[in-house]
Amino acid sequence: MTGWVDRRWMSMSNQRHDPRWAAHRPSGGALGRALIALGVVLIGVLVLVLDGHDLSWLAGLVAGGGAGAWIALVRVARRPQPAGAEPTLGGAKAERRTEAAVRSLERSGWRFRHDVRGSDRTFDHVAVGHGGVILLQSLDPRGVVTMRNGEPWVERATDPEAEPEVLRIRPRAVTDAVAFRDDVHRLTGRRLWVQAVVVIWSDFPAGVVADGRCVFIHGSRLADWLTRRPHQLDVVDTDDVFATVALLEETGGRLPLPVAV
């Protein structure tokens, strides 16, 4: 009998490391709720056995329920928030840090607008300078950001056992760049190349990753990256494009409809 128990225990231990078993095992939340319910019943039974009165059984249920509710509240308070759901993912704090990071570049001819309202969306930051037209989006997810298949993934330091979470920000960044280009074209008839950039303010070991139409960069490297951009616009073009950005902001997104040709 002892040998069977030992073999059974070894089998269960091996299953814990098998990803197929892990995919079907109950979650920590479900297990916690089951234990709470079991605790309520056991406390009631224990009081009833010791005292033998129905009133004691009821008191045991109340006591067990109170203890279970307290445990549940503690578990919820300690549970880490998903990285993708945090308000810091693309909040005002991250945008202010990006504004501060590029402010010094205005002395070298770069021009910036923040929170620019387009035809159907708002753009975090628009940069216009010798390095072209750059559309920036600011992110600050909690955790370590790594790149996988062209998308940033967040590993939450507060919960090492949690699975990394994909942000899926690249399609949005590229779509925003196309939308901004189209808005400018509808205003002026001028077509521009608009570079999409995602500025990451959390831990990003790679520093800079250029992936086709989208660049992912840590905020501390942004100013230097813009300074080193190849020359695309002269001073006159920079002023002209920036005036268009200002006009777009003044219209409040009320652009004329495109004319079919």
Image: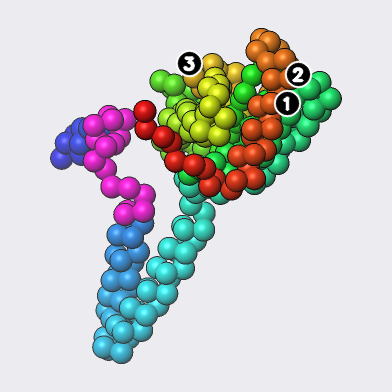
Residue furthest to the top in view is 230
Q: In the displayed structure, does residue 139 sit left or right of residue 114?
A: left
Look at mark 1 in the image and give the residue it sits on: 239
Q: Quadrant of residue 35?
A: bottom left
Residue ID for mark 3: 212
Q: Amino acid at mark 2?
A: Val
User: Which mark, residue 235?
Assistant: 2
Q: Decide: marks 2, 1 in contact (CB < 8 A)? A: yes
Find residue 38 and report its horizontal and vertical position in percent: 29, 65
Residue type marked 3? Gly
Q: Residues within 10 Å of mark 1 (few under 14, many from 20)?
A: some
Q: CA distance from mark 1 to mark 3?
A: 27 Å
Which of the 4 image quarters holds residue 112?
top right
3 vs 2, front mark:
2
Which labelled disc corresponds to residue 109? none
Q: Is residue 255 above or below residue 175?
A: below
Quarter-of-image position of residue 162? top left
